[in-house]
Image (cartoon, rainbow, N blue to C red):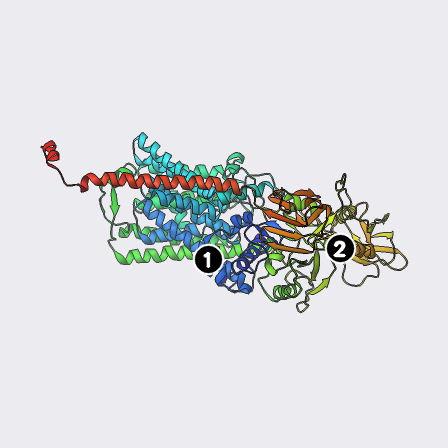
Amino acid sequence: MFCAADAVARSYPFGPRTRTVNDLGNQYVPLHAHLWDLLHGRADGGLLVNWQSGYGSSFLPDLGTYLTSPFALLVAVFPRDEIDLAVYVITVLKVACAAAVMAWLLLVLSPGRWWAAGLLGASYALCGWTVAAAVYNLMWLDGLIALPLLCLAGEWILHQRRPLLGVLVVTAAWIANFYTAYMATLAAGLVLLLRLALCGLPSRRKAAVAGRAGLTVALGVGLAAPLVTVIYFGTQHASPGRFTEFKPVGAEDLLARLLPTTYSFGSPALFVGTTALLLALALPFHRAAPRPVRAGWTLLVAGVTLSMQWGPTHLLWHAFAAPQGSPYRQAFVVCALLVMAAWHTLSYGVPAPRALGAATGVLALIVAVAAGSDLVRQVAWPVLLLATAGALGGLTLLGMAGGTGDWKPLGDRARRLLPTGDRRLPVGARRTAPVALAVVLLLGAQFGETVATSAVASRLRLAHLDDYAPWGDRQQWQAEAIARADGWPRYRTDPGREQTVANDPMLVGGQGAQYYSSHTSDVLLRTLTALGGGWTSGGRSLQSLDNAVTDVIFSVGARVHSPPDPHQSRDPEPDARPTVSRQDVPPLVTVRPTATAAPAFGPSPYRNQELLLGARVYTVPRLDVSAEAVSARCPAGSEVYLWAPRFAGTAQLAGAPGPAARFRSDASKRAALEPLGTVPPSGRLTIALSAHRPGRIPVGAVGCLDTGKLRTVVQRLKTTGATKVTVSDGTIRAELPAGSKGIAIVAAPRIAGWRCATGNSAPAPAGNYHGLISVPLDGTSNSLTCTFRPPGLRLGMTVGGVAFGTVLLLAVVGVVRRRRTLEPAARPASRGDLAKIA
């Protein structure tokens, strides 16, 4: 069904339309490409530090957030240039796995037919949340699998079975994707509480089950702590991003998302298929089901749905952190509960005509209210009509044929664990042909509406989200150009200002400023912003900065210049190849004189660059600004830069060759400083402006760089800088000239976790020199070593060790108890025993 929908939408890999939208293109595909490089030993860095992005970023938080799913390892078996196909196959496998696990859970919750469990499992796996939101946030699909798995663990706890496996299930879920695993754990807890309320066990037994469940979750999360704590502290040190205040959607939009082919970015996608929805709606009216079951499951579904619409509980579902982007990320929980409710309806036999009629009436009421929503498009009506007809026809045939089968009594043990009144078990069908026809109708209805819903979502995503082309000639040419120029760690090779995706360094190689992640560090954001850098996504997506001074500061010795991306450009140059420019730069580790009182960054990016460089190299002239131009005077032959972070449009230096520089800014974007050309011999420069929307040019927007002075500074930094630098994952080693005094500056952001030492001295937390790593030098040592350990790793290892020891202890105690229980039965009876028995 999933692949058929992409074929209908003519989406990759079954058609010309790309499926790589939004964060899938900007984050997840590049991160999987970086994982491919790690697994094949081709990445710059390792598990601790990613040296390709953000001039050196902590990688373990990214790994735990995006790449610790066991499915992610499958990228290794695909060719590097088929990374998009690898991600697609992983997505399909996750969806299929979610369907299988949900079907397994349904059969454990209550007896029933395997084919019915399979259909409802597919309804869950291909719910609206999956096809509308999770297929391009593929790490969320691990939560789709985790929810039924955690509910299975709850059933094992209820039946006092597989205690160790339950702990491992929790651990696997939280390692695969802790974000959705948190939501799935809450949902599984609610399901277990409902099962306890309905099982009829004594209060003491219920409390024991709840206690075992709490212990299972604590131990499972404890075993995952080495990763979870690193992720948590990674978010604490990340840039704040841009968050919007939560506003619940109206009733029309909420109910509309229950229907097929509806789509929007900001409303909960609750579609589970018409058959599952009708069965769930029929549960309150299904007299064959005990009243506690009907009331309990109905109230649980309604309560969780309403909890998405209230601010405090909405935040609770998101771990008290407002989502940046789509707000209803917990919608898959409601979809799961709807499917479970539908299964409980079916497990007590096909609803009678009266119950089905009532469910159809409620569905009609939902449709009537939803009809007022703009989310319901014309295509929804024929799809809904056919799906309803197929669902009602199939369920009616099942009821007429006795498709739920005859009944036989349950055993005493099973009777105690099932809800009051549930005393029978379905067996074989009375008539094969009507049941087979019913299955065909139900499957056909589900297939048609699911394919239509997924295809519509795929098409509409392209209409309002950014999209990116899969790996092709452009990326191949970029990768080849970078490979030819690469000189790491002697110098960095930046993939270039004209980016293909926001994480170009991970996708095509090199070592640049570009970095887009939930863990983009705040110190890197503030440093690059002060130097004139640009960003999007509220500061979480940092861009390359094409500037000679910052290239010297960060040791960027080679820079790729690519033509505009043909997939994004209105005037594409499909055959244009990237070029590479070279610049003489100092090593990654340089030595500066000790500053008695280093001034803080100011408003001018040019003065801030000089502060990090240690020399004056810019002329910042007075400007004459009009609506259409900027004019100034600068030394002839100097390089002209324009800094206009809140300007959206184009700027071109009069007489300069080449296209105009583009500036992009809005509420969530900041335009980067751009090079415009060379000052003419007259010293008079004019910059023509073409604004796309109202903006402003700040004071000191123009800077004129004296390239001769810059070359002099470079030679001095090379003379006093490190003679040799080696980099391996989270360690930097540098050999310095004898007698070096002052401050050693490492051209990497001073993110939390760096510790440095000179010579044989003990490591200490690295200093912070305007956002870069710094180490004081006293002239007695000629070597420097800096090591990185992610914040939270030691705490996580400690918690994980305690959890592991506790699990091991409980396992040993369990084995001893079982042996003691078995020994009296296995030992032959003595005469004394026989006498006691007599």
**826 and 320: which is toward the camera:** 826
Q: Is residue 306 visible?
A: yes
User: Closer to the N terminus: mark 1 or mark 2?
Assistant: 1
Does residue 586 lie above or below 277 as drawn? below
Q: Is residue 772 visible?
A: no
Left or right of 336? Residue 438 is left
Classed neighbour count for the residue bearing mark 2: other residues with Cα under 10 Å, few (<14), some (14–19), many (≥20): some
Point 61% across, 45% down: residue: 754
Label 1 – label 2 distance at C-alpha: 56 Å
**639 and 448: which is toward the camera:** 639
For the view shown, which residue lies furthest in the right direction?
Answer: 682
**Residue 723: which quarter of the image?**
bottom right
Q: Where is mark 1, residue-wise?
A: 92
Instruction: Identify which amino acid the numbered label 2 is placed on.
Output: Thr
Q: Where is mark 2, residue-wise?
A: 719
In the structure shown, which secondary structural element does the residue marked by tag 2 occupy?
helix
Point 42% across, 55% down: residue: 96
Q: Which mark is residue 111?
A: none
Residue 67 screen position, x and y as percent: 51, 52
Classed neighbour count for the residue bearing mark 1: other residues with Cα under 10 Å, few (<14), some (14–19), many (≥20): some
**Residue 418: which quarter of the image?**
top left
Residue 733 screen position, x and y as percent: 63, 52
The N terminus lies in quadrant: bottom left
In the structure shown, which secondary structural element does the residue marked by tag 1 occupy?
helix
The C terminus lies in quadrant: top left
Left or right of 323? Residue 69 is left
**Residue 431: which quarter of the image?**
bottom left
Instruction: Identify which amino acid the numbered label 1 is placed on.
Output: Val
Residue 807 screen position, x and y as percent: 38, 41
Residue 271 screen position, x and y as percent: 46, 48
